[in-house]
Image (cartoon, rainbow, N blue to C red):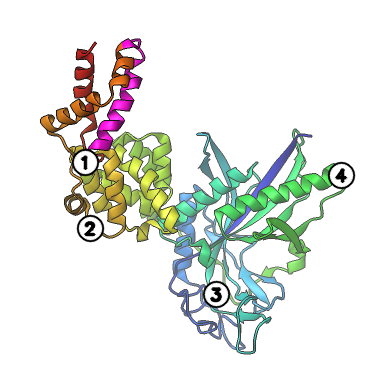
Amino acid sequence: MGWEIVIGLEVHVQLSTKSKLFSGASTRFGAEPNTQACAIDLAMPGTLPVPNEEAFRYAVMFGLAMNAEIGRRSVFERKNYFYPDLPKGYQTTQLAEPIVGAGEVEIHLEDGSSKMVRLHHAHLEEDAGKSLHEAVFESGHGMSGIDLNRAGTPLIEIVSEPDMRSAAEAVAYLKKIHSIVTYLGISDGDMSQGSMRCDANVSVRLKGEEKLGTRTELKNINSFRFVERAIKVEAERQIDILEDGGSIVQETRLYDADKNETRSMRSKEVANDYRYFPCPDLLPVILSDDYVEKLRGELPELPDAKAARFQGDYKLSAYDADQLTQERAIADYFETVAKESGEPKLAANWITGELAALLNREELSIARSPVSAEQLAGLILRIKDNTISGKIAKQVFEAIAEGEGDADTVIEQRGLKQVSDTGAIEQLVDQVIAASAAQVENYRNADEAKRPKMMGYFVGQIMKASKGQANPQMINEILKEKLDALL
């Protein structure tokens, strides 16, 4: 049967403000548990919340970057539920009048296609604390604890329309959101630290049907890879149930990465269950047109605009430009290499190839790259002026990554300078031809169309004899001339 997956995402982005949404408590990551939750965060009697203006500024910047409506009036509500990591017994959030309204974002897929995904809205809210189920406490093992440092940290919750039809599209959308918030500088987007988390609403229906199927919500997924795997396995679970004649229960589920399965967490609440009502301690927030337009003028160059510029200024393909602009730090790294080397295409190839492989292998971000942009530019310059070949350059790159210095230092200390002396290369060519009588005879007897491929044997032997340091272009020119002289 032909099934269609329908996906909508709720993305929680922790804003990089220094203090919390309604208090002056620090939001610094990594502090000892329960050292950064003040009386306001805990809703102690006699305390009143004071809105953090910086959080509103960040939310408006996000809305403008998403071509979304900006709520000139936004209102906070109390969302009531009881959970150990929510000491207030309610979460201060926005429902009826959020700060960001409808918008849209274009996502780019690996097959080269693109798609628009609609944004329903984005609202400001405070984060809850964190339940610790795997820690070891003074009382011993097998216990749970609560860390309230995160309680009250400002979030924007970004709610999409159910426009995505595959796990790949969902990941592309999530990566685009990550790219936008980090370009804006409103969040570090570090999913491993909880700065960005995702709830995925997944349903299936027969292809051609208009009515949406019953959805389940996958909670708090904190990596791109897990989002993709969770959606796939949940969609398969739902399809299996429906094909066996069963029905889907609307519920919240958790994804278990170790078992690659989803499991039921609780029945899905609806708005009535939360008993929303306007927060009595907070007035509506009114934004002027001048305030919004001032922020519009302060927006940085965003990923799509930067990718278009890279295609125009550096003559990159759409694919390369998209790969290099997904993260602002990578885009900045590329521009440094391209400008200092004067070889943007080579810069793009090295960054998306050798450098990306190195960072993935070592599990490093571009900010912690052991090869700086200036060092990579220096390496490309030595390829450009034929000091080293492309093959030797990979050895030099690894040496730079190991801390042996810049390209010039490595080339000098390891004696890797490319041999471009005509006499020396002629001598190597003569030695290989003299030692390859059978291959020479085959070359002489071969059709003219086959001879270029047969030269590969001789080139390989010459490169081996020169320990990879002979100039490949000169080898090919001299070798062809000498072989043709034997015909």
Look at the numbered disc 1 and give the secondary structure of its residue. loop
What is the distance, in whole Å, between disc 1 and disc 2 at their CAs? 16 Å
Mark 3 lies on residue: 150
Q: Amino acid at mark 4?
A: Asp
Q: Amino acid at mark 1?
A: Ile
What x and y, as percent, mark residue 462?
A: 25, 32
Q: Amino acid at mark 2?
A: Gly
What is the distance, in whole Å, between disc 1 and disc 4 at their CAs? 64 Å
What x and y, as percent, mark residue 456?
A: 32, 26
Mark 1 lies on residue: 388
* Quadrant of res 261: bottom right
Quarter of the picture containing the C terminus is: top left
Look at the numbered disc 4 and give the secondary structure of its residue. loop
User: If you read the primary sequence from the N terminus, does the residue marked by circle 3 or circle 4 appear first?
Assistant: 3
What is the distance, in whole Å, between disc 3 and disc 2 at their CAs? 42 Å
Mark 2 lies on residue: 405
